[in-house]
């Protein structure tokens, strides 16, 4: 049996205010060809199908098109709900969809009823675990105090092991969780490990999802994880596929695709990577505005999503508009002028002591503008400002005295 492990489609997510739907349409539209060319039997989507709990009607159309294409290519589809999904909405009509080879798993106890897949070697039990929140799914284990995601998922996988032992079939588990183990170790093939992925930091600090150790998923033939947006190998049989498109500039240069998983009569036999197309690559460019607008070395990025870090000593006026004249898809600008020369160990108060207002302003601007101090027109303006402020202070002091 051959599986294609994907996750985190996030239909409806924006990228710096821009819709990612055109890119997702193209990438999801390429999956049927991968299914046909590689002879994939089942496509897995391990959670976060949508980016919001109330998806727009258009997004359901994109999902329907993707599923229809995969089914017409000859593969079944198994989808679980993630923390971004509304389980009730996503799971509507799941009972009838399963009759057509599309298994949408959103019920919290669905793992107790494995999806049975068959090949020439017999049955494969697929235990699909939707995203489970301990505070919201207490009915799964009445009377047991499972306060963390880690405790709940460990309890669920223990129950799955019991079922696997009773049934005796090969086993595949799907879970939308933050799983970590052996962090800091690079996989032999250069695959990113989860610790290197930007998505982890976001979920730990803002998503409130606690860490599930890799050992919780030990012993299954394959574990298809979702939740992290970069591919990762936690163990040969435990992997994240990552998102199908880039959702952050921190992902620039990282591959997009899915894991092709082969099972034989004894279980897992091979896992290989299948690249997805990248409709619009990411580029992180750095230089002065003039350099970015004229340097031919940047020409290859004119159709890319661009993040520009401007190193001009003085913040350029109307930089985004000017950049978009060359880079139509410039999405984000950072301003990071070149570091000014060191002023020694003296404190700021010591450096400005006994200096005039004009000297203080001149030194400050030289500090923040990489050594570029006041020009003559700026000096004239500052003289007028200083004189006006001094006049206001004098008038206020006179009034107070009276």
Image: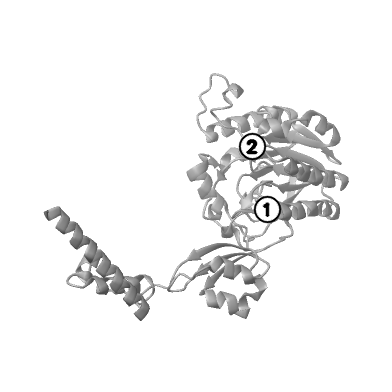
Q: Is residue 264 visible?
A: no
Q: Residue 272 lies in what quarter of the image? A: bottom right
What crowding class fits label 2: few (fewer than 14 Cα within 10 Å), some (14-19), or many (20 or more)?
Answer: some
* Residue 116 at x, y percent in the picture: 79, 33
Taking the spot 27% from the left edge, 66% from the top edge, the residue there is 388
What crowding class fits label 1: few (fewer than 14 Cα within 10 Å), some (14-19), or many (20 or more)?
Answer: some
Q: Is residue 144 above or below residue 395?
A: above
Instruction: Single out the residue that lies furthest toward the left.
Output: 401
Taking the spot 58% from the left edge, 30% from the top edge, the residue there is 155
Q: Give 318 or 59, whichever is nearer the viewer.
A: 318
Q: Secondary structure at mark 1?
A: loop
* Residue 262 at x, y percent in the picture: 77, 49
Residue position marked by numbered label 2 in the rendering: 53
Q: Give 280 or 123, whichever is nearer the viewer.
A: 280
Q: Give 255 or 163, whichever is nearer the viewer.
A: 255
* Residue 135 at x, y percent in the picture: 53, 28
Q: How far, Cα to Cα, is label 2 from label 1?
A: 17 Å
- Image quadrant where one finds the N terminus: top right
> Mark 2 touching mark 1, by CB under 8 A?
no
Q: Which mark sits nearer the N-terminus, 2 or 1?
A: 1
Q: Give 263 or 20, whichever is nearer the viewer.
A: 20
Q: Secondary structure at mark 2?
A: loop
The answer to whether 6 appears left or right of 353 in the picture is: right
Taking the spot 38% from the left edge, 75% from the top edge, the residue there is 370
Q: Is residue 109 above or below residue 279?
A: above
* Residue 171 at x, y percent in the picture: 72, 37
Residue position marked by numbered label 1 in the rendering: 20
Q: Is residue 228 visible?
A: yes
């Amino acid at each position: 049996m051959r599986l294609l492990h994907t996750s985190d489609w996030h239909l409806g997510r924006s990228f710096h205010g821009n819709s990612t739907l055109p890119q997702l349409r193209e990438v999801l539209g390429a999956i049927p060809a991968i299914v046909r060319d590689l002879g994939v039997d089942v496509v897995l989507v391990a959670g976060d199908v949508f980016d919001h709990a109330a998806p727009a009607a258009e997004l359901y159309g994109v999902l329907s098109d993707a599923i229809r294409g995969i089914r017409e290519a000859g593969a079944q589809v198994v989808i679980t709900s993630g923390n971004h999904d509304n389980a009730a909405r996503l799971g509507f009509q799941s009972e009838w969809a399963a009759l057509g080879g599309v298994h949408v798993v959103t019920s919290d106890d669905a793992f107790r009823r494995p999806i049975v897949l068959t090949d020439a070697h017999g049955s494969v039990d697929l235990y699909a675990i939707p995203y489970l929140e301990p505070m919201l799914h207490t009915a799964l284990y009445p009377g047991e105090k499972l306060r963390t995601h880690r405790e709940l998922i460990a309890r669920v996988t223990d129950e799955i092991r019991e079922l696997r032992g009773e049934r005796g079939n090969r086993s595949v588990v799907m879970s939308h969780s933050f799983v970590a183990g052996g962090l800091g170790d690079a996989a032999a093939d250069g695959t990113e490990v989860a610790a290197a992925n930007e998505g982890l930091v976001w979920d730990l600090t803002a998503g409130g999802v606690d860490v599930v150790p890799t050992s919780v998923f030990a012993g299954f033939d394959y574990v298809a994880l979702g939740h992290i947006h970069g591919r990762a190998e936690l163990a040969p049989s435990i992997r994240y596929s990552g998102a199908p498109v880039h959702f952050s500039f921190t992902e620039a240069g990282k591959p997009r695709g899915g894991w092709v998983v082969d099972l034989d009569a004894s279980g897992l036999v091979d896992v290989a990577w299948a690249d997805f197309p990248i409709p619009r690559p990411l580029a992180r460019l750095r230089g002065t505005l003039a350099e970015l607008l004229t340097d031919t070395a940047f020409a290859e990025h004119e159709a890319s999503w661009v993040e520009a870090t401007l190193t001009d000593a003085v913040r350029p006026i109307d930089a985004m508009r000017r950049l978009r004249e060359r880079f139509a898809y410039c999405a984000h600008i950072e301003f990071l002028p070149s570091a000014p020369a060191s002023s020694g160990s003296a404190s700021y108060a010591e450096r400005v002591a006994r200096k005039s207002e004009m000297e203080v302003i001149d030194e400050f601007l030289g500090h923040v503008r990489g050594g570029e101090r006041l020009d003559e027109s700026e000096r004239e303006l500052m003289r007028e400002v200083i004189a006006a402020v001094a006049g206001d202070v004098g008038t206020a002091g006179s009034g107070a005295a009276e």
